[in-house]
Image: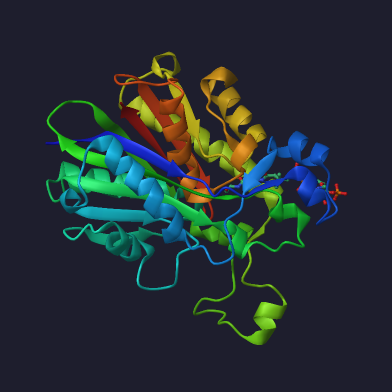
Amino acid sequence: MPHAIIAGTGRYLPDNILTNHDLEKMVQTSNQWIVERTGIQERRIAGKDVSASDLAVPAAKKALAAAGVAPEEVDLILVGTSTPDMFFPSTACFVQAKLGCVNAAAFDMLAACSGWVYGMSVANAFIRGGQHKTVLVIGAEVYSHILNWEDRATCVLFGDGAGAVVLKASDTADGILAANIFSDGSKSELLFAPGGGSRSRFTPELVAEKRYTLAMVGNSTFKIAVKMMADAATKAMKENNVTPADIKLVIPHQANLRIINAVAKQLGMPEEHFFSNLQKYGNTAAASIPIALDEALEQGLVAKGDLVLMVTFGGGFTWGSLLVRL
Ligand code: UT7
């Protein structure tokens, strides 16, 4: 059975920086509160006319260049996003057209912050089964468009960006060793964007009341996230008879530094083995792990042959883990 190996990565962040001090002028918050409770110092905000595919395309171009893969060679594009360009066509179809990936099927993975890990899991299954050989898996989000900028409990947390990975079929034993995804729809109302879908269609009232924006019960989400991320990480290691000491770097979803540190504690691993860049970007939802992976590779924190564990959690609830030998 072929293995899915990571052949190239890329990221794209909008230039515009919104600092905690900028937010102090917009809502009743403080740099101190945001840093102490989340670790976030600043985030990137896309222009008001920028869509998810606009961020996805430059990230994907960098990943393709790093992999030495031409657009025509890509046979599948998966975009993890919960801020799609529109309901349909999928953002992946827009990406396909903009990149000229004329031989690729394309669809989105709607699993909130877990969308990219879900995409990696689906891509892995397609590659292992022989159906696809060269897959672009992208996480791309413009959460700034679905935030309530008057709600201090949520607007300080998120940022915009995109990350991309090229997966290729290989007959080596490296690549994705475990890809686990989970969900629990019974807790959907703890983290959701309720308005604008077929249940609660766009009306002038819905827009006026900002019911299309993200709403979260932060505290409950925090506790469940820690448990599920630790469980998913443990499962990926156990399946492969791997111990925490074998892992070169854990790349967790970048929601909150306190969540990351709590997961490290539960796993009995040093915090220094966990990558974080949420200080600069906030929570970029489905884009957070591929952006972080690209930065970790660029910084030389991981290299070919290293074992990397990635673990995510998001609205749905959805969560999952990936164990990869680079
Ligand atoms: O990406 C998907 C997964 N996302 C997550 O996992 C996020 C999970 N949740 C969290 O990261 C944290 O729960 C938050 C960062 C959202 C909140 O931190 P917390 O320690 O759970 O605070 P809290 O919600 O319990 O709020 C504590 C206090 C409240 O005031 P009172 O009621 O104690 O007077 C809030 O009103 O902090 C207040 N507060 C703020 N104060 C200043 C909430 N947001 C802010 C703010 N600035 N931005």
The reply, left or right, for residue 300 in relation to residue 47 is left
Going by the image, does 170 lie left or right of 263?
A: left
Q: Number of callouts in the render? A: 0
Rendered residue at 64%/41% (across/down): 223
- Quarter holding the C terminus is top left
Q: Quadrant of residue 244?
A: top left
Is 217 or 13 nearer to us in this picture? 13
Q: Position of residue 145 (x, y in %)?
A: 59, 64
Query: Measured from the top left, where is residue 278 in percent x and y?
Result: 60, 37
Q: Is residue 30 above or below residue 200?
A: above
Residue with the most extreme front position: 15
Q: Residue furthest bottom?
A: 204
**Identity of the residue drawn at 15% across and 45% down:** 133
Residue at 37% across, 31% down: 236
Give the residue displayed 36% in from the left and 41% down from the top: 180
Q: The N terminus is located in which quarter?
A: top left
Residue 95 vertical placement versus 161 (above, below)? below
Give percent across and percent down for residue 132. 16, 49
Residue 123 in picture, x, y percent from top left: 26, 47
Q: Nearer the viewer, residue 77 or 99?
A: 99
Q: In this rendering, does residue 325 appear at all? A: yes
Please indicate, yes or no, whether residue 316 appears anywhere in the rendered image. Answer: no
Q: How is the image coloured?
A: rainbow
